[in-house]
Amino acid sequence: MTPEQLTRQLPPRPGYRLADYVEVGLPVYRITARLFTQVQKRIGTIDEFLLRLVCSGVQRTPELAEFLGLDKAFVDDSLSQLLNDELLTLQGDSDRRQRLMPTAKGVKALEEAETVIVEEKTHVVDYDALLRTIVQMGREQLLSGFQMRREGRKQIRPLLKRTIDINDLSLPGLQKTISAVRLEREQRRFVLAVRELYRKKLYFMPAVAVVYRSLDRADIQVAFIVNGKHSPLHDDAFAKLDGVRLLGIDSDLSRNREIEFAEIFKEAEEMRASLAGSAVSPLTLSGAPQPIGDEREPDFFEHLSNEQKYDLEQNYVTALFVQDHPSLLQFALRSAKHRLLIICPFLTESVCSSQFEQRLEQLLRAGVRVYIGYGMPDSDQQKPSKTHLNVINKIDSIAKRNRLLKIAKTNSHAKLLLVDSLFFVIGSFNWLSFHGDPDRPFRDEQSVLVSIPNMIERKFQELAGLF
């Protein structure tokens, strides 16, 4: 499922609205630890015979070697191991000589045909640095820092500022992990103690961080979606560690310029008043066109809330929030009939992907005029990124083959999507770079959607001159 679909599954939070969502990586340490473990081990045939002979009264090495027909040195080594494993012991006799005697452990081992020994062995475990607990994960579930940047995910670094030590690894957690990875043919092993942690490497678990902002803008909360499901444990751990402040989410949102849509709503009201009673009327919910090609895309109102749909039905204008935008972009790329205009400051390959290029080519073959404007400034402080330039070059090469596509540097930070005479959306959402930028700050993404044809045409004429 896409991040947008996942965010829609989260339960509503009374008094809060969804401000932003970001694909992130939660910190997980892969730790190599040296453990003391207790192993239940089946007694070998030679050891079993030696124990039985000692129990029957054969207690001297020469007698044992002769009885079994084995080399005396070999028998000595075997007896030494049995003594070391505490299955045998040496006791003084009346003639001041030491004799071999079975211990209680040795007798029990003979009854069960197995014994218990202590081993020192290294094991690899995964430690969730946010939950501060051992977790069971496959190697394929974790990403390195390099993979995180390549996928455009934001790294959430460990918030606990002290070094992990042996006390952080609980014995029950270690036991559960070791038991889970034990092969059927392997011996059962029980963890007694952690001796040493001698290697720790930081990885990241893919997740989606969803930022909520209170309606009075005073409070911020963060929810996490892990493995496709909401993880309240990560929510609580993040809140207890004061993650909103430590990651600068509060300062990021405070720097967001308050978006004023009053003028657009006022213009829409005046436009509706001027159209009242005339033959010209704004589009209704059934006015969405059919998509290009075989796929049939639902109308662009499908993912909106009932409240937003009501606003459009009554006023032909509604406010949008962050999760509303991606489905509108997909609708535009599939269903535009005559014209499509997109303006945003930045371009990234994660949004302007090969699928985006295919959709673009499909629109152009169908005779749709496409306008793409970007406003990334050239300055010493903010140079265009490599991915930004790569996207420009790819789109420019398509434009050279098809004159219906126009791409231009608009020197503007406007963010706008316009489709035919259906609607335009204007606000803070970066249409072609929202995903895939690990350095992107947290934002409060809002826009307004207008479906009044006269206003749409006026907005198009205003911007078409940039191309």
Image (cartoon, rainbow, N blue to C red):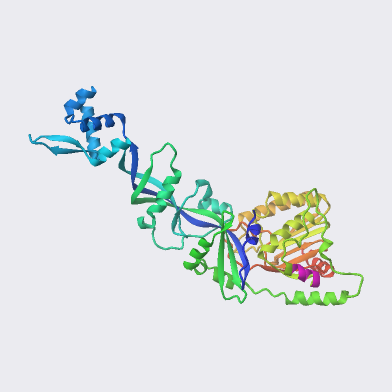
Left or right position of 38 against 333:
left
Left or right position of 222 against 352:
left
Task: Please identify the quarter of the rendering in which residue 102 is found.
Answer: top left
Magenta stretch, main secondary structure class:
helix
Q: Is residue 313 magenta?
A: yes
Which residue is drawn at the image coordinates 50% and 47% (left, top)? 138
- Position of residue 60 measured from the top left corner of the image (x, y, whole percent): 16, 30
Left or right position of 343 against 152:
right
Q: What range of the chain is rendered magenta?
A: 308-314
- Position of residue 362 measured from the top left corner of the image (x, y, whole percent): 78, 49
Task: Please identify the quarter of the rendering in which residue 169 is found.
Answer: bottom left
- Position of residue 430 measured from the top left corner of the image (x, y, whole percent): 67, 63
Residue 59: tell me if it is visible: yes
Q: Is residue 412 magenta?
A: no
The C terminus lies in quadrant: bottom right
Which residue is drawn at the image coordinates 45% and 44% (left, top)? 181
Task: Please identify the quarter of the rendering in which residue 352 is found.
Answer: bottom right
- Say if 399 sits above or below 263 in the image: above
| Foreground pick, 102 / 283 | 102
- Say if 57 sits above or below 307 in the image: above
Tell which residue pokes out farthest to the left in this image: 95
Which residue is drawn at the image coordinates 29% and 38% (left, top)? 109
Tell which residue pokes out farthest to the right in this image: 279
| Foreground pick, 75 / 156 | 75
- Position of residue 337 measured from the top left corner of the image (x, y, whole percent): 83, 56
| Foreground pick, 322 / 308 | 308
Left or right position of 416 against 348:
right
